[in-house]
Image (cartoon, rainbow, N blue to C red):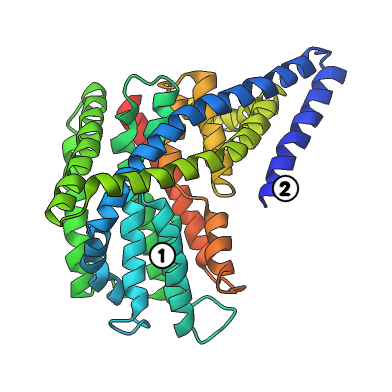
Amino acid sequence: MLNGLWLGFFLVAAVSALAQWLIGGNAGIFASMVESIFAMAKLSVEVMVLLFGTLTLWLGFLKIAEKAGIVEWLAKVLGPLFARLMPEVPPGHPALGLITMNFAANGLGLDNAATPIGLKAMRALQELNPSSTTASNAQILFLVLNASSLTLLPVTIFMYRAQQGATDPTLVFLPILLATSASTLVGLLSVAVMQRLRLWDPVVLAYLVPGALLLGGFMAFLGTLSAAALASLSSILGNLTLFGVIVLFLIIGALRRVKVYEAFIEGAKEGFDVAKSLLPYLVAMLVAVGVLRASGALELALDGIRHGVDWLGLDSRFVDGLPTALVKPFSGSAARAMLIETMQAHGVDSFPALVAATVQGSTETTFYVLAVYFGAVGIQRVRHAVGCALFAELCGVIAAVCVCYWFFA
C-alpha cells in the first residue's frame, strides 16, 4: 500500500507538470519540481536534528515511567472496564492485562512499548477466537480503539511545531485532546452498536459517566472563553501538563527506588536508535509531497474541494489543512510529511497548519493498524472493523476542524 501511494505521488505530479507545460505553457514547472526535491531533502535533515534530541529526551523519561510501574498501574485501573466490554474474554485472562497496558502505553506516548504489547494482546485474543481467519468481537473492539488514537501527550506534534519555529509549540494541546476524545468515543459507540454491547452495565457506567461529565463540564467552561483566552489556556495547560508529567515520573521513580538517571540513559539510547531509523522514510515522503505540490496537482485537488465547500456556503479556510487528513488512513509517514509541508507553505501558526497538526494528533493510520494487528494473527475477514475504524477517523477529522475554528478562528 505504501509503495503504491509513494509511486502515485510522483506519477500524479508528472501528469500535472506535463499538462501545465503542454496546455498551460509553463515551461518552468520542471525546474520548480527539481528545486523542490533538493529543498525537501534539506528540510528532512533539519527536521531530524530536532527529532534526535526530542525522541532521545522523551523516551528517556518514558523509560523511567515504565520501570516505575506507571503503565502496569494504569492497566490495573482500566482492567475492569475492558472485562465488561469484552464479555467473551474470561476474567483474569492475560489478554485483558495486555490490552489495558497497550492503551495505557499509547496514552502516555510509549509507542515503542505499545506496539509489541498490542501484538501480544492480539495473539492472546486469537487464542480465544473460534475462527482462525475471522476477527472476533473482542479483536475488533481492540483494533478500533487502537485506530481511534487516544493520545494524551502529543509530544511529536509539539516537536514538529517547534522545529518549524512556532512561538508556542503546545498551542494545539487542548484541540488535540478534544478531537482525539471525540474519535475514541465514536469508535467505542460504533462498535457497541454493531456488537450490542451493554454500555449501561454499572461498571462501564462507572468509568464512562464521570469521564463524560468531566469532559462536558470542561467544554462548557471553555465555551465561556474568548478565542484568545482559549489559545492561552491551551498553551498553559500544554506546558504545565508536559512538565508536570516529567516531574511526576521522576518522583514516582525515585519513590519506587528506580535508578532514574540510569533508566533515562537506557531510554535515551532507544530514542536515538529510533530517530536515526526514521530519516530515510522522512526524506522519501517529504520529497514526494514537495514534488506533488510543486507540480500544482495538490493545489488543483484542494481547489476542487474548496469550490465544493464554498458552494455549500461554508468557510473554506480549513481546506489547506486537509492533505494530512486525506493520507493519514494510509501512511503515518506521508501524513507527517504533509503536516510539515503545510507548515512550510502556510506558516507554522497559520490556520491550515493548526488544523493539520490537530488532525495529525487526533487520528491514526487505520489501514496500517489493520494490516499489522490482523496480519500478525492471520485474520482475513475483518467484519465491521474497517467501517467502524474509518467512521471514528472521519469523526476525528471533523472534530479537529470544528475545534480549530472554535479555538483559532
| Image location of residue 358, percent across then percent down | 40, 37
Decide if residue 189 is in sight here. yes
Residue type at the position of mark 2: Gly
Which mark is on residue 156? Answer: none
Closest to the camera, between mark 2 and mark 1, is 1
* Image vertical order of residue 111 relative to residue 297, above or below: below
Gap between marks 2 and 1, in whole Å? Answer: 29 Å
17 horizontally vs 280: left or right: right
243 horizontally vs 342: left or right: left
Residue appearing at x 36%, y 47% in the figure: 267
Residue type at the position of mark 1: Ile
* Chain-order first, disc 2 or disc 1: 2
| Image location of residue 198, percent across then percent down | 30, 75
Disc 1 marks which residue? 117
Residue appearing at x 20%, y 64% in the figure: 207
Disc 2 marks which residue? 4
Residue appearing at x 79%, y 19% in the figure: 30
At numbered mark 2, what does the secondary structure look like: helix, strand or loop? helix
